[in-house]
Image (cartoon, rainbow, N blue to C red):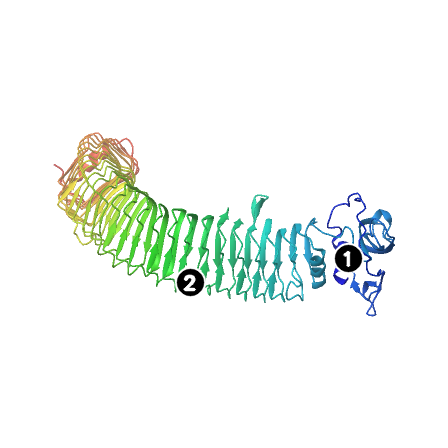
Amino acid sequence: MTRLLARLLTLAFLIACEGPRGPPGEQGVPGPQGDAGTSCTIGRTDGGVHSVICSDGTVAPIPRSPGSLVRLDQEPAGINCMNGGTRITTGLDDNGDGELQPGEVRNTAYVCNGGSPSGSTCTTLEGSVTIHNSLEWLNLVNAGCHTITGVLTIDALGMTALAPPATSLRQVQGLRVEGNETLTSLSLPGLERVTERGIIISGNTVLLSAALPALASVGGTEMQGEATGGFTISGNPVLAQIQVPALSTVHNGIQFVGNEALSAMAFPSLSTLTDGGLSVEGSERLATFAAPVLARADGPISLAPVDLTSLSFPSLTSAESVSVGGPQLTSIQMSTLTTLRRGLTIGHAPRLTIVQLPALTEGEITLADTGLVTLSVPQLRRGSLTLSSNQALTSVALPQLGSATGIEVVGSPALTTLSMPMLTASDGLHFLQLPQVAVSLPLLRTGGTIEVVDIPSLSVPILEEARSFSVSANVASVTAPQLARIERELTVMDSAVTTVALPLLASVGGRVELQSFDGGLTTVRLPALQSVGDSIRIRSVQTSTLDLSSLRTSGTIELAQGSTSALTLPALTFCQEIVVTTSGFPSVALPALTTVGDGGVRLYATSSVDAPVLSSVGGPLGLSGSRASALSLPVLAVVGGDFSIDSNSLLSTLNLPQLRTVGGHFRVLNNPALPECRAWNLVGQLTMYNGVTISGNSTTCP
């Protein structure tokens, strides 16, 4: 009787679980004589609790909800109660008179003598329900509802468990168990499905276990442009056990965050993660994980850092990404995985010695700080490879890789074999600090950004184009005989390379920079190079051969801090700037040069200057510290900046018959062999200049 009354009274508290009562059915066959009738009244117990009190001694407290009313009336024998009984009417006090009027009735139920009340079965509860205490939980359980169309929220101070169990509850729109400071166990044994709003179990400070043994699916949706739903368990510091043995599908992902005591996790039936993935963070004690039938994850799978010794997804075929790491991890096995839309990331796993990806055809692979000795991905055809600080790694084999978004191998001193024989294109190639690897990519045609540092050699025999090409630190040789175009820059910096020879290179969109402080670079052959978008800078190079014979246009051309016998650019017609500051007193021959831009011309320590068709210099023109005996620029008409001839010990002749404009200051200083009158004669032919300084030259005028 108590359970029956509680179920009925729940109707008052929840305000009508079910829809309107249908018309009466036909009169049934009379049953056997029932028990003696029971009469009930509304009153208060000795403790003053508002209750339904029945003649058989049953007392049921009435849940109080603001504005709710309950009225008991005798029900005569009839279609509602064959032997008579008590009619329980519930509703809201709309007019505030404290009495339940006929127009305020929301629901009617019956306690029948010798039978069950009519209309007392709750199938669907419309709206959301929040449980604040154990009595409210008891009333929900006794109502026997199968479905809650809204969110079920447990926010109950003082409750330690959801008891008695809600065995009849099968489906809710969402489940929220948050901020319960006394709840130690959570069990919903009948719950099979959570729809659009998902599950959140969060901030329950003493929760030890959560059991949802019948749960098969967790849904999600998009509300106001944001995804909702999924399965989130977070901030439960002592939670050690989660049981979801029947869970097969989750929409919008699984997130377990900040559950420090969680040591084991099993999803024995989970097959699909739709529009989401699986993330475990802040669970460093997690030592076992199992998802044996998980086949697809639309989002990322992330377990790091954890205390796992091994990770296996034996049925997984596709995922957005997989990320894992931990100091105890020794093996990763994903034997059926074929596609990673992003990639596999393994970090800080110094004991890891086994990675098995026998079926993977597409994905990005990143391994950092592992104990891996060999890596083989036999079927990988598209993707990328990033390896860093894998001190024990000796061999890498990607025999089918044809196209890569990037290859980066850094800091693997034991690596002796790097095999990618089918690679034809990559957005980037970075090989750094691999002292035992001679890198050979026999089929590579497009290289993206290429960077090699501290490796013995690089051979790319049919490479045709690259975004950039950089060589530095202990690279003894580079072979790229077919390279024709570099989009951005070519740099050779402080390398062991003695020769830079790129016989077919025709254009560099950015800069060319060659620098060798130890003087090892002696030969530069770029005979087909026609254009450089930014600059050519050759610094600290003791060149015996410098071949730029086809160069037509460039930004800055700088030859600095080294020695060479000559700077000869027979095809050059335009450059933005020319700077020669070597110690080798080279001759400068620019037979086709007609125009220099705003950067101007600055020549130091040259032996001769030949620019017979140079007509315009947009910036300054300077000759200093040279051994040239004459400066002859027979068609030069304009110098846009300063004109400066300074400290040239052998200079005796200035031949600039067409010079008419100097945009800056005119200076001729400290040239002991140059008659000063020749400088003044030059000033006399100018039509525009901005100041004159002539001194320290020869006072003898022939």
Q: Position of residue 370 (x, y in %)?
A: 34, 60
- Please state which amino acid type lies under the numbered disc 1: Leu
- Does residue 419 sit above or below 569 in this rendering? below
- Residue on which disc 2 sits: 308
Q: Are marks 2 and 1 in contact (CB under 8 Å)?
A: no
SS state under label 2? loop
- How many residues crowd mark 1 within 10 Å: few (<14), some (14–19), many (20+)? many
* Depth check, front residue: 676 or 635: 635
In the displayed structure, does residue 494 sit left or right of residue 352? Answer: left
Q: In the figure, is residue 313 to the left or right of 193?
A: left
Residue type indicated by callout 2: Leu
Q: Which residue is label 1 attached to?
A: 9
Front one among 382 and 516: 382
Residue 424 visible to an observer of this rendering: yes
Which image quadrant: the N terminus? bottom right
Query: Quarter of the image holding residue 546?
Result: top left
Q: Quadrant of the C terminus?
A: top left
For residue 512, which quarter of the picture? top left
Distance between mark 2 and mark 1 Cα atoms = 51 Å
On screen, 686 above or below 559? above
**Coordinates of residue 13 in the picture (x, y in percent):** 75, 56
Q: Position of residue 38 (x, y in %)?
A: 84, 61
Percent position (x, y) of residue 12? Answer: 77, 55
Q: In this orientation, which residue lies closer to the viewer: 569 or 662?
A: 569
Mark 2 or mark 1: whose residue is earlier in sequence: 1
Instruction: Assign a secondary structure to mark 1.
Output: helix
